Amino acid sequence: MAHDVFISYSSKNKTTADAICHVLEEHEIRCWIAPRDIVGGQKYGDVIEEAIKNCKVFVIIFSEESRISPWVESELNLAFTDRRTIVPFKIDSSVLEGEMRLILNNKHWIEAYPNPELKFKDLVEAVSRSIGKPTLNETEQHSLKVLKSLQNDSEQFEIENDKLHQNLFHNKEKKQLEHNSINYSEEQKNDIKIETKKNKDYQWAIIASVVFLGIVCFYSLIKNNDNSTKNISSMKDSMTTDSSAVINVNKYDTGTFTDYRDGHIYKWVRIGEQVWMAENLAFKTHSGCWAYDNNENNAKQYGYLYNWQTAMKVVPKGWHIPTDKEWKILEINLNKNNDFLENKAGFSGLLAGCLNNYSNIQFEDLERGGLFYTATTDRDTRGVYYVSMIPDRDSLFHNTCGKEMGFSIRCVKNSQ
């Protein structure tokens, strides 16, 4: 697939890299990023060299980890040799040294430390300018000009239309008066005036009757509504004495569920038509299951991290791992207003990090990101879709990865 941007990063900064890829592609800027765009069986070196040669912009996520990464250094050298436009995106306070300093020292940096997400817009604008795509500001200004032009045209049309109608009305009235003066005698004109006055009086009498009836109906409606409100209030009062009949008037229903396998009690919350666990799964297995940093205290707070094979068989009876579509329905129901992390709906999105098994086993991004399995696999079955949460973003974003990663599980109750 043709692409505009190559994203270079250390595996320890994968959450930020995925977020940048998502934001750029939301603005119709095509990206190439590993491992998503590497087909199984291909050699990393060959594929990456070809991807850099075919890109227009080389975005390097600069951090202490990428500074010492031989892969990132090699990719940067290729981009520099091929004279690609290089945009450094700096996410920590590390200092340029050695060969990277020679290449990047005179580049325009995007200083994204300590909150990279707040600088995503600057990155989109920098890349857009480099590939000849209208920037956000240029697009907004063009939209405003078009809108203003349409408003002016609409206002001018209304003015001309009003003038036309006024002229037509006056001409018609004038012709009618001329016709009356020619065809009717003075006596006939007086009779017409008397008859016209009677008609007007009759019309006003009808209008007065309608208004009176309207007032009576409106008063009756208010009276009935007031009685209905009292009846509803009394019904609620009477129902509170019977616990089986109490109506939950809160926006989100909540409750608890006990996993019979280990006795663990989970909170749940009903959001729309879905019932979600309000905490991460914490069922321990003999393999394919890890507490973050191998610290069991982390598992008590954040649940366990599972690989794909274990995730498919560890869910309690009556529940399931949500599909990518079910995650998107949740996102719509929560109106994309950060309910995931701020716990407005009781969902309690936990930033439990992940276990990165791509190169060497390492735990990453505790309290910086939460990654959750979906039950939806990629078309060529090489990977699985997952959902990611990061602070300061107003929505979830969806991506794919290999099945060897260690992610959290958030379960959805089966439909009855």
Image (tube, helix red, strand yellow):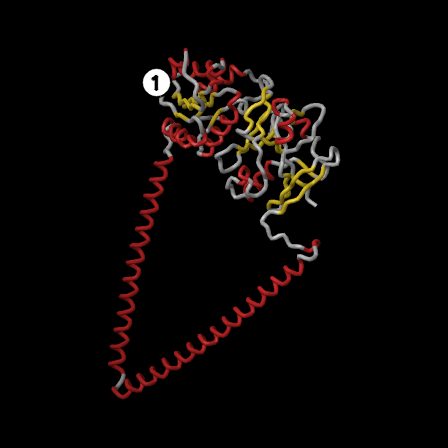
The picture places residue 133, in percent across and down from the top left corner, at 38, 31
The image shows residue 209, relative to residue 256, as above or below, that is: below
The picture places residue 316, in percent across and down from the top left corner, at 71, 35
Q: Camera-side residue: 402 or 68?
A: 68
For this orientation, the residue located farthest to the top is 98
Residue corresponding to mark 1: 106
Give the structural element (helix, strand or loop) at label 1. Answer: loop
At x 28%, y 73%, the residue is 173
The image shows residue 163, relative to residue 375, as above or below, that is: below
The picture places residue 304, in percent across and down from the top left corner, at 65, 28
The image shows residue 93, relative to residue 162, as above or below, that is: above
Quarter location, residue 255: top right
Q: Camera-side residue: 344 or 159?
A: 344
At x 27%, y 88%, the residue is 187
Q: Is residue 116 left or right of residue 282?
A: left
The image shows residue 187, relative to residue 34, as above or below, that is: below
Task: Give the quarter of the figure containing the C terminus.
Answer: top right
Q: Is residue 141 left or right of residue 399?
A: left
For this orientation, the residue located farthest to the right is 260
At x 64%, y 41%, the residue is 268
Q: Is residue 166 left or right of residue 33?
A: left
Q: Camera-side residue: 135 or 310?
A: 310
Quarter location, residue 176: bottom left
Amino acid type, label 1: Asn
